[in-house]
Amino acid sequence: MQKLIDMGVADPGGIALHGHSWSGYQTAFVITQTDIFACAIAGAPVSNMTSAYSGIRWESGMARQFQYEQSQSRIGKSLWEARDLYIENSPVFFADRIETPLLIMFGDEDGAVPWYQGIELYLAMRRLGKECVFLQYRGEPHHPRKYANKLDYTLRMKQYLDHYCKGEAAAEWIGKGVPYRGK
């Protein structure tokens, strides 16, 4: 990013980071390491590998441990053999370092990443007084499938990016939110 800024290609005050699923996790992790981004959007991120480790992938019924030991996370050891690595790679434990406004999105029927992973990071950031918005789509899986929710998420991402990257006025939902029970 710094090279692109130095070359004059990127506006240093208007760079955003976005990812979903594995790259949603990477987005959440990266903002614990740098404040170069004006904002970040993480869809379905794992935020706490210690709590996700012994969960189940609801769509397949498989235990989630394999993905941390042998698959995406590549830790190579169990939680008990490498506890420190699970903590080091979990954004929730470093939420106090986050200075980047974050938008988290989950479907509450996500069969791959338990949506409480987003709740953990959201509540950590709120407790720490950090800027964070949580979008939860009822009845949606890992990626929104209903057209209305796809459109809603797209429009909200645009509003979020326009506010943090372009300096436009914040949409009301960014500052006030929409109560969970009110929708």
Image (cartoon, rainbow, N blue to C red):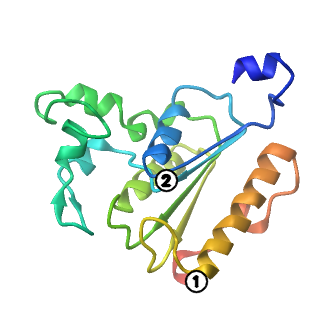
In which image quadrant can residue 70 be found?
top left
Q: Is residue 22 above or below residue 139?
A: above
Locate residue 132, reporting x and y percent: 60, 51
Residue indicated by mark 2: 122
Locate residue 33, reporting x and y percent: 53, 26
Locate residue 82, reporting x and y percent: 17, 27
Amino acid type, mark 1: Gly
Q: Is residue 150 above or below residue 148?
A: above
Q: Nearer the viewer, residue 170 or 70?
A: 70
Q: Nearer the viewer, residue 93 or 76?
A: 76
Q: Quadrant of the C terminus?
A: bottom right
In which image quadrant can residue 155 be found?
bottom right
Q: Is residue 23 above or below residue 111?
A: above
Q: Residue at x 77, y 46 (%)?
A: 164
Residue indicated by mark 1: 182
Q: Is residue 124 left or right of residue 77?
A: right
Q: CA distance from mark 2 to mark 1?
A: 19 Å
Q: Quadrant of the N terminus?
A: top right
Q: Residue at x 58, y 83 (%)?
A: 182
Residues at badges 2 and 1 in contact (C-beta under 8 Å)?
A: no
Q: Is residue 75 left or right of residue 106?
A: left
In which image quadrant can residue 118 be found?
bottom left
Amino acid type, mark 2: Tyr
Provide the secondary structure element on which disc 2 rests.
Answer: helix
Q: Is residue 180 above or below residue 65?
A: below
Locate residue 74, reporting x and y percent: 27, 32
Provide the secondary structure element on which disc 1 rests.
Answer: helix
Looking at the image, is mark 2 or mark 1 earlier in the sequence?
Answer: 2
